[in-house]
Amino acid sequence: MSEQKSNAKKRALFICLGNICRSPIAEGVFQKTVADMNVTDQWEIDSAAIGSWHVGNPPDWRAIDTMKRHGVPYNNCARQIVAEDFHNFDYIFGMDEANMKDLKRKAPKDCKAKLLLFGDFDPQGDRLIRDPYYDSNSEGFEKCYQQSVRCSKGFLQSLEEH
Ligand SMILES: *[C@@H]1O[C@H](CO)[C@@H](O)[C@H](O)[C@H]1NC(C)=O
């Protein structure tokens, strides 16, 4: 519909199963990474869920706590991915192989977005971001934060190299 402009914003969507643990952290960290690089105005960033369990809810308190501790602002609420997302976003990131499978199953034939595993941009090669939802503590959330920092920088660097 709309024509591609060279100065158009790039759009990134972060996906996980429920949009309350991993994808909010990935979204918040990516947002902060582009802010630190002074390129906020070049990006539109959001996150969403595969499933509808937590729609309208803020992230898990451990995700909020982890972001607060690292100075990552966040005030988004969970929503489920919709068909238009596959047209509106340039990049859709899944956190693990199950997310990628679900994304490929949901993607329309004329999907415009690139479906990418976030962990493929980790220079340390830690490809999967494990779901910490059922953990009894916050360690998995901290690990998700650290992975998101590396993957956000790694992805932005990969864009510069092209
Ligand atoms: C971003 O802008 C701030 C303030 O102008 C500046 O101090 C900083 O060096 C810039 N960072 C980058 C990565 O360009």
Image: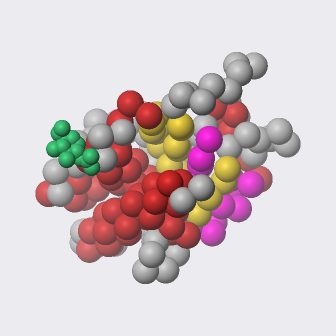
Residue 39 versus residue 158 in the image, above or below: above
Residue 157 point in image, percent of width and height: 46, 59
Q: Position of residue 120 (x, y in %)?
A: 55, 70
Q: Quadrant of residue 25?
A: bottom left
Q: Tell me the quadrant of the picture where the C terminus can be found.
A: bottom right
In percent of width and height, residue 79 lies at: 49, 37
Magenta span contains residue 143:
no
Residue at the extreme top: 2
Q: Nearer the viewer, residue 24 or 71?
A: 71
Q: Is residue 46 left or right of residue 150?
A: right
On the rendering, which quadrant does ligand 1 occupy? top left
The residue lying at 60 percent from left, 37 percent from top is 89
Q: Position of residue 1 (x, y in %)?
A: 75, 19
**Residue shown at 53% from the left, 54% from the top:** 159
User: Is residue 88 visible in the rendered structure shown here?
Assistant: yes
Which residue: 63% across, 69% down? Answer: 97
Q: Is residue 53 above or below residue 137?
A: above
The residue stretch that appears in magenta: 90-104
Tell me, yes or no, whether the highlighted magenta stretch contains residue 102. Answer: yes
Instruction: Please tell me which residue lies in front, 83 or 62.
Output: 83
Q: How many marks?
A: 0
In the rendered structure, the answer to whether residue 22 lies left or right of residue 36 reads right
162 over 127 or under it: above or below: above
At x 14%, y 57%, the residue is 69
Residue 2: quarter of image: top right
Extreme residue toward the right, this view: 109
Q: Nearer the viewer, residue 128 or 59?
A: 128
79 left or right of 162?
Answer: left
Does the image show residue 65? no
Q: How is the image coloured?
A: secondary structure
Relative to residue 14, is residue 145 drawn left or right? left
